[in-house]
Amino acid sequence: MNPSRTLATARRVLLQLRHDPRTVALMLVVPCVLLALLNWVYDSTPGTFDSVGASLLGIFPLITMFLVTSIATLRERTSGTLERLLSMPLGKGDLLAGYALAFGAVAVVQACLATGLAVLALGLDVTGSAWLLLLVALADAFLGIALGLFVSAFAASEFQAVQFMPAVLLPQILLCGLLMPRDRMQPVLEAVSNVLPMSYAVDGMKEVLTHTGVTGTFVRDLAVVAACAVLALALGAATLRRRTA
Amino acid sequence: MNKVPEAVRAHALTVVRGGRTVLDNLDFAVPPGRITGLLGPSGCGKSTLMRAIVGTQAHVTGALDVLGLPAGHRTLRSRVGYVTQAPSVYEDLTVRQNLDYFAAVLGAPRADITRAIADVDLTSHADALAGNLSGGQLGRVSLAVALLGEPELLVLDEPTVGLDPVLRRDLWALFHRLAADRGTTLLISSHVMDEAERCHRLLLMREGRILADDTPAALRDRTGSETVEAAFLHLVDEANSGQNKTAAATAATPAGESR
């Protein structure tokens, strides 16, 4: 790892995004619009918005970062720039950390906008600190980055990469407790949801929603999400090969 | 005697990919500070050989030393410049932003960026988005990246494909300047035989083997040909008739002996 190469990579990824303002706008505006829409849908039952809205604050950064990272990494692989970079003195860690920093920065902006909108304008009723919501959103974003990087190794085209989103993320969304509390699901499904990282992303958000301080459960949820992100990142790093057939 | 090692030295170099032998037991050397042309029809293994030299090719067996170190050694990563056939640059960055980034990765001085852009004659397009450039211009951005940090060995995979005659002449002049002034070793592949005459030395390849390793003049003399192209065809015919004889000989040998 070399800080100047990591920062140069992060800067490069952000510059690429700057040349693509539409993607940036979609990443930042769409979650806000969806939250507002949801608030309207639950107009008659404000309590439901609290629970579903908080869950979505955890799910949005995961989905967005998963998509941009899997496509961006796939592009690096297919355009030959990855091969070029790996034939240069760039560490795999520099590349991964550069991506994580750049997209992490976008995730911070996205999470600030979405959390700010939900708490200040849409009346999301949070017992805990909004900063903790932000912290979970960031951890979720890193999980999305790590998962996106990992699956991009198995996608041969952008078509396939996009299809990995429903394949990898939709089952997690169905089982994470957004539609049905996890402890009221069929035991097999509950067991499955217990090993899916998004369940902890959503649980962490709900924990902040209902508790004032930092609880043990909150710390555990955050740790599980972070550990899964590190694991996926390590697996993703293993798919970056300097020598290829 | 052999104090200055060859830039590249291969011994029994073999690459098998997907059950197919792409490079078959190659032995050759690339002299330092010279332009060596790697010529042969497309699909003969030129790109695989170049990837083996820069250390991105998997399943390489035999010995392959680059600048005195095993190919792909980590310290070679900043000493060897490599340009793939397809331009490998970021199309959503400008020319200068591309070079800025790769210079930072290589740890090359900032002055290299402006010079590399000038070397490939893109100064007027320095702030254009790479994706808006023509194919030939994009290829030159990719070449400019390889010039950063003054690498000792430049491995260029068909760098002049699709360029007009004036640009091709200018690039060849640049290659000769690099060899003469900076002592850079260049290994340049091409399937255009008239470019062979501009090289100091030639490696002629066909079907994963090296047909000839000589200077253009010596090749022409040896085969009694007017051009390198004619010499190449002569050597191919020679190899084909030799192969037929070998095939006949192998067929005559009892199967047990060759095992």
Image (cartoon, grey):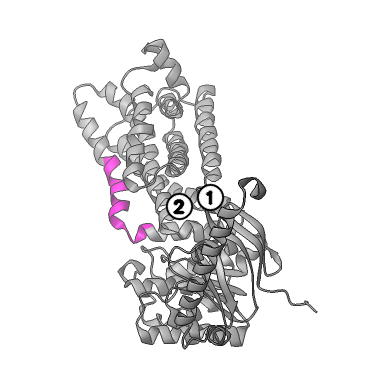
**Can residue A214 be seen in this snapshot?**
no
Residue B134, percent from left and from top: 31, 73
Instruction: Have a look at marks 2 and 1 and say if they share a chain.
Output: yes
Residue linked to disc 2: A102
Q: Identity of the amino acid at label 1?
A: Ala
Given the image, what chain letter belongs to the residue carrying mark 2?
A: A
Q: Secondary structure at mark 2?
A: helix
Magenta region, main secondary structure: helix
Please name whichever residue, B103 or B2, is drawn nearer the observer in this view of the structure.
Answer: B2
Residue A232 belongs to magenta span: no
Chain part drawn in magenta: A17-32
Residue A28 belongs to magenta span: yes
Q: Tell me if B242 is positioned left or right of B71 in this view.
A: left
Residue linked to disc 1: A97
Q: Is residue B224 above or below residue A43?
A: below
Given the image, what chain letter belongs to the residue carrying mark 1?
A: A
Q: Is residue A234 above or below residue B169?
A: above
**Can residue B17 be seen in this snapshot?**
yes
Q: Is residue A60 above or below residue B195?
A: above
Please name whichever residue, A32 or B109, is drawn nearer the observer in this view of the structure.
Answer: B109
Q: Identity of the amino acid at label 2?
A: Ala
Q: Secondary structure at mark 1?
A: helix
What distance separates the C-alpha of mark 2 from that of mark 1? 9 Å
Q: Residue at x 46, y 20 (%)?
A: A194
